[in-house]
Image (cartoon, grey):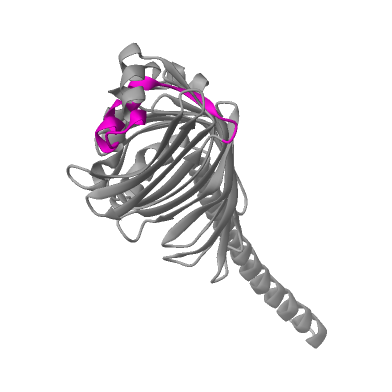
Amino acid sequence: QTFTAGERGITRMQDDFDGWWKIVKRIGFIAILVLCICAVGISFLYFLFNSPQLLESNLPRWLNPRLPEIVIQELSIGRQSFSFPCYFHFKDIESQILQGSQKFQVRIREVDLHGLEIFTAQRRMLLQLQGVDVQSDLLALREGQLSVDARFTDRNIKTLQGNFKSFGLNLANYVFTDLKAGLSGDKNTIMFNDFSTDFYDGQIKGQISLDYARDIAYSITMELTKIDLRQLQKVNPEFFSKVRGRVHGFVNAKGDRQGINALEASFDAPEGGEIKASLLQYLVAYIPQIPQRKDLEKLIKTNGQVPLERADVVIKSISDEKISSKIQLESRKFNLGINMTVDTNIEGGLKNLLKYLSNFLQN
């Protein structure tokens, strides 16, 4: 069969078109295959990011080696959801955490984790916790809320900013309500700025600094205002049944996880108060043989109530094993005036000061 030049050109064009079409179909097939693989991969990742089981099993394994002396023993997540590119929402988290001999039961109602600027060198993360409850033998925290804005690099936290508040905290049976504090820090330190809490019809304000790069060293500065001592009878009736009044004070303490290293504190009752005479018994040995001493000894025998127009106490650590207490008490009714300084040796050093004070309050 003979073809004209025009027909041969048309046939050649058709052959070229068929060849290109085959290439396009192959490329399309490959593209569809790649898209399917990507879709399956994304779906798998989406499933993993929305699966609580992944974090429940792997997060403790990742965190425990990086948290000295803290062990996450159990972790349960009720619900988990993920949104692109980096937003996680968790509900009904329960965990059991061990620190030394203390075991903490932690419950968190909601957690929001939002990663920002995740593809830059200076990454940013927003963390919000709602309904935080913590329970241990030492403390019980109720309805805590935490909000943190963290900036970090691959290995280090650059800055932390945030705030914390809680409906209530029971610490060694002492009850703190309406806690509020600002947060700031970096890879080595964290600061609780301008914290405040209501405490037995009074208030406590101050700040706390923690340096977890240096054996968890801390510095605490507190101002106490109008604390009602009578209400503290619920906690320690043996001691606080013997004192009445509203106390103001200032406390500055430094130490580490082993205990207190330095202490300076002052307390006074500007509105006056009352004290059981038996509580002054340990002061008798420091009073010279003067009529005031005899009056005080008589009061101690009858365990009478001594009204005070002035009650000032200043405590200061003067060495690793000794504190100095300056005591000023005045009672016009009993013609009692005490102005003395007492140095006390703390067995085992200042690190046992809290134990010493606890024994003193009980005895």
281 over 159 or under it: above or below = above
Name the image quarter holding the N terminus. Answer: bottom right
Q: Residue 248: which quarter of the image? A: top right
Residue at the extreme left of the image, as rendered: 348
- State the extent of the magenta-drawn residues as a range: 270-292
What is the residue that sits farthest to the front in this orientation?
291
Residue drawn 79% across the image and 87% down it: 5
Instruction: Look at the picture and state if 360 lies above or below 152.
Output: above
Please identify the residue farthest to the top as the structure is shown: 302
Q: Position of residue 339 (x, y in %)?
A: 40, 41
- Name the residue: 27% across, 37% down: 286
Pick the front one: 308 or 290:
290
Front-most of residues 127 and 310: 310
For the residue pair 119 and 199, the one nearer the viewer reads as 199
Tell me where residue 2 appears, x and y as whole percent: 74, 82
Q: Residue at x 82, y 84 (%)?
A: 6
Q: Is 71 above or below relative to 132?
A: below
Between residues 243 and 182, which one lies in front from this camera angle? 243
Viewer can see residue 137:
no
Whether residue 145 sits left or right of residue 190 in the image: it is right
Q: Measured from the top left, where is residue 276 in percent x and y? A: 40, 20
For the point 51% across and 20% down, the residue is: 230
Give left or right: position of 27 versus 153.
right
Residue 37 in view of the camera = yes
287 falls in the magenta region: yes
Q: Can you name the residue that lies furthest to the bottom here? A: 5
> Which quadrant of the figure contains the C terminus?
top left
The percent position of residue 138, horizontal first and vertical second, equals: 36, 29
